[in-house]
Image (tube, coloured by chain):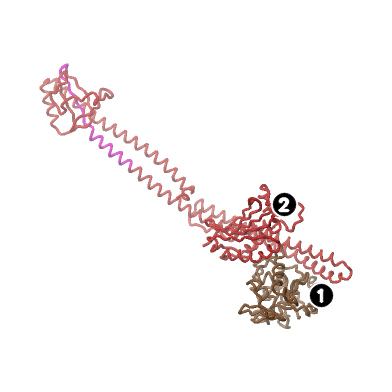
Amino acid sequence: MRRLLRVSSFRAVLVYLGLFLASTGIVLLFLHGQINRALTSNNDKAVWRDAAMMNQSYALGGLSEVEKLVAQQSQLSGVGVYLLADGLGRYIAGNVPAFPAPADTQMQEEGWLHLRLQAPFAEARARLVRFDDNLVLLIGRDLSAQQATMADLARSFFIALLLLAVFGVIGGGLMGRQALARVENINQSLRAIISGDFSARIAPSSSQDELADLEAQINQMLARIESLMLAMREVTDNLAHDLRSPLTRLRARLEKLSLSAQKTGQADDIEQGLADIDQLLSLFTAVLNLSRMEAGTGDMQQQKIAVKPLADEVMELYQAVFEEAGWTLDYVVDKAATTAHIIGDRHLLAQALINLLENALVHGVGSPPHLTLSLTRRDQQIIIAVTDTGSGVDDHQLAHIRQRFVRLDESRSRPGNGLGLSLVDAICRRHGGQLHLSNHRPSGLRCEICLMVRE
Amino acid sequence: MRLLLVEDDPMAADLLIDRLRCDGDIVAYAENGEAGLAQATQDAFDVLIVDRLMPKLDGLTMVRQLREQGADTPVLFLTALDSVDDRVAGFAAGGDDYLVKPFAYEELRARLEALMRRKQLAQDTMLTLADLTMDVIARRVTRGAQEITLQAREFSLLEYLLRHKGQVVTRSMLLENVWHYNFDTQTNVIDVHISRLRNKLDKEFSAPLLHTLRGRGFVLQSADKLGDL
């Protein structure tokens, strides 16, 4: 439901529905008032007619004639309310035994009275007709029928509004769901592309609305991105080939020279030259790999990988290295993490973890040097964390150390090319995860590889 | 060793052929895949060294066609293409090893030796060198009368070294074949594992078997035969 509320079309439907219901409500209220007024006005006319008739009969036959007529009218089963009384208000004839108490009498416009009466009547609208000082007639109409009609009407109107609201919400929900399904379709394709599949396209929908236009535009954009990526890949591949060929010859020449230089004593210089070439090459390879990884053009296997065995293997490889260097190690795997699987490339993930371990080995030496590798399951994520006890990183530099060629060691005397964490970061993002860096208390750096678990 | 080098860069080929001939190999040369295929089908070679990107017929297609004709000569791809997929494609086409340019000559040398002897060693289940014996099936290692207890990975490492006894094996060969990682590490991780294995293997014995050759790699061999390497 919360997701549906986020869909703009559903929100728009809700807003329209609200406005529509409010205006319909106002119209119905107005209609209700008009009908009530019309009924009242009809009643009033009937009372005026009655009064005219009574006046006429008084003019013709005086009290006895009126008394007869009132008695006659009162007999009629109907809505008429009559009370003929003398100057002191005493009952002479009619179907109401006495004037209601002042509390039950309410003065209204133009001499009309609103009365609360005893059974069988409930409420009535009436007026007084004064024939002479000694003879008064209360004449009116009972309102219960009109009130019942108006209550029925109000109930009907309310039900109508309620039905409108229900159908509106359902319709809006359906429309929103439909829009949501299509937006979800677009999102799915975009997610595939973000994780590196540049050949993914949005499946075209059958409708020809603005959303279909948008899909077509996105597909065109994707085609363009794909062709750019392919072009870039060709460039990097060519560059790799064209740079490697002369380097291969240079290396072979130096090796050849090195053989003959054993006698002349220049062998050390040449060995150094070879080492320089190898360093150049490893830097070049690292930059190339990183660029491919960041651009998503690098090859990546999509296999189901059990995380713990992968970490076990890397840990087994490096445990000896850390121990030889005088480190102590902790390897902690929480129970929920032991069976976690992810989808990705075993080699790349192993490389990411190895980069973090080697990083700690070079930059995270504390006193005493200690490393913790932990696997933790947090909801749908598996977190592979490497924590050292070194001096950590200044908080303001934490954000920068994953950038290319950033080395906090100003003199650049420690080994490394400043690409290690960049590559880990790129590998994490290629797997739809993240690399989190934080300082560990009391001292040390904590690097977390966070990846989505796939069941 | 009789080698065929198929490489489209004549200068690089010259330099490599010089080195190989210095080491006593007989080297034939073809400058594209088509010529390479023709030569490989005509003459018998111990190992083929094949570049991947070549005019006329690229290395992958050449090796695939060669394999289709039933030839099982070991092939080492020499290439500037270094991605995992390129590597996988190389093995899928019928290559036996894969070396990315530029490479150290010693690395190539070690891999050629390994390729040449691989066939005859793959099936053995009892491996021996001097007084060292490994029973691959029972997973037992003894030296003289003494049993040596090894962890699983140490066992694999020793097994690989024994299957290539007397040959130089490089760090990247070990990382690829024992740990199955094909990227370079920044630390001396392989050296550490070798030195641990050496502690178990050689420490209590007078004649060391596991040797480090500076700048080349490691070799498992009796000390008296090291001079040949």
Residue nearer the viewer, A153 or A334: A334
Left or right position of B119 against A209: right
Give the crowd class for mark 2: few <14, some 14-19, many >=20 residues within 10 Å: some
Q: CA distance from mark 1 to mark 2?
A: 45 Å
**Label 2 belongs to which residue?**
A408
Mark 1 falls on what kind of element?
helix
Residue A1 visible, this angle: yes
Residue nearer the viewer, A364 or A272: A364
What's drawn in magenta, residue-wise? A132-158
User: Within the magenta stretch, is there residue A435?
Assistant: no
Q: Position of residue A183 (x, y in %)?
A: 51, 53
Q: Position of residue B144 (x, y in %)?
A: 69, 80
Up-down relation of residue A415 to residue B143 (above or below): above
The numbered dot on residue B18 is: 1
Residue A231 visible, this angle: no
Q: Position of residue B214 (x, y in %)?
A: 78, 70
- Name chain B's colour: brown
Chain containing mark 1:
B
- Name chain A's colour: red
